[in-house]
Amino acid sequence: MGFYEKHIFVCENSREPGKRISCGWSNTSKIREYLNLKIKELAPDKKIRVNKSGCMDRCEEGPVQVAYPDGVWVNLKSEKDVDDFVNSYILKNDLGAIDHLLVK
């Protein structure tokens, strides 16, 4: 196992308007901040790191986030999405309840 149990990357890339869509246009910095807050609140003993990232080239499916080491791609757009992700995947390692958030 690596240093972190899970390492989550949140795309915050922003392009100029008129070009390809960007995850950063969807308030992903606020999603990342809320994700960090919920993990610290609900899983303080777990070694989980949340980082912003640049483009992960899945822009049209965005906003996207990816969690390693599992390689789980998700589309978190709201605080409710983050709550569901943390409660199911972070706390229980269960993807079944968040199938609607998975990017396949």
Image: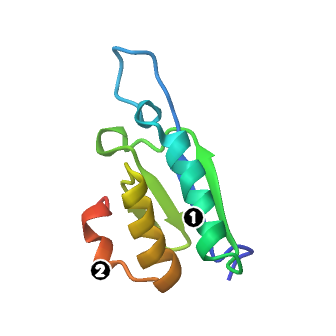
Residue 59, by quadrant, is top left
Q: Where is residue 16, by image quadrant?
A: top left
In this view, the residue farthest toward the left is 100
Q: Residue furthest right?
A: 3
Q: Secondary structure at mark 2?
A: helix
Image quadrant where residue 2 sits:
bottom right
For the point 41% across and 78% down, the residue is: 88
- The residue lying toward the viewer, choosing from 86 and 63, is 86
Give the residue type that dot 2 points to: Gly
Q: Residues within 10 Å of mark 1 (few under 14, many from 20)?
A: some
Residue at horizontal 51%, vertical 65%?
Answer: 67
Above or below residue 55? Residue 32 is below
Q: Quarter of the image containing the C terminus?
A: bottom left
Residue at the image position 44 percent from the left and 60 percent from the top: 82
81 w.r.t. 30: above or below: below
Q: Nearer the viewer, residue 42 or 55?
A: 42
**Numbered disc 1: secondary structure:** helix
Q: Point out the frontmost of discs 2 and 1.
A: 1
Badge 1 amino acid: Lys
Give the CA distance from mark 2 to mark 1: 20 Å
Q: In the image, is residue 15 above or below residue 83?
A: above
**Residue 4, position as x, y percentages in the image:** 69, 73
Q: Which residue is label 1 attached to?
A: 38
Left or right for 98, reference 65: left
Residue at 38% in and 50% down: 78
Q: Quadrant of the N terminus?
A: bottom right
Q: Which residue is mark 2?
A: 96
